[in-house]
Image: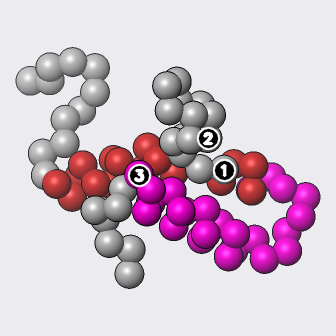
Amino acid sequence: TQNGFFNRTKTALEQAKSNIRNLLLTNKGERLGNPTFGTNLLSLAFSQENTDLESRVEEEIRAAMSEFLPFINMS
């Protein structure tokens, strides 16, 4: 049976996946009380300037992960 509105995670791996998804899909400024949480991936995706887009996306993800999920190793 399910208690609450959201599915529960049963393992640390499931929780890590959920945390990463939440971080990457949240736009900076979107979370009340923590305006720096999230990424600017949406604005990068629709940016007119496509020069070096891959490295800019990678840097955005690495910066957010190191700040908010430092316990996850991205090697």
Residue 22's disc number: none
In which quadrant of the rendered image does the N terminus lie?
top left
**Looking at the image, what colour scheme do you see?**
secondary structure
Q: Residue furthest right?
A: 48
* Crowdedness near tag 1: few (<14), some (14–19) or many (≥20) residues, C-alpha within 10 Å: some
Q: Which mark is residue 28?
A: 2
Report the Cα–Cα distance between label 1 and label 2.
Answer: 6 Å
Question: What residue did someone put label 3 on?
Answer: 68
At 90% from the left and 58% from the top, the residue drawn is 48
Residue 68: image location, x then y, percent = 41, 51
Give the residues in magenta: 45-68
Return the disc, 2 or 3, that comes first in the chain's sequence. 2
Q: Position of residue 42 (x, y in %)?
A: 69, 48
Residue at 35 percent across and 61 percent down: it is 70
> Contact, CB < 8 Å: mark 1 with mark 2?
yes
Residue corresponding to mark 1: 40
Check disc 1 and give the amino acid type.
Asn
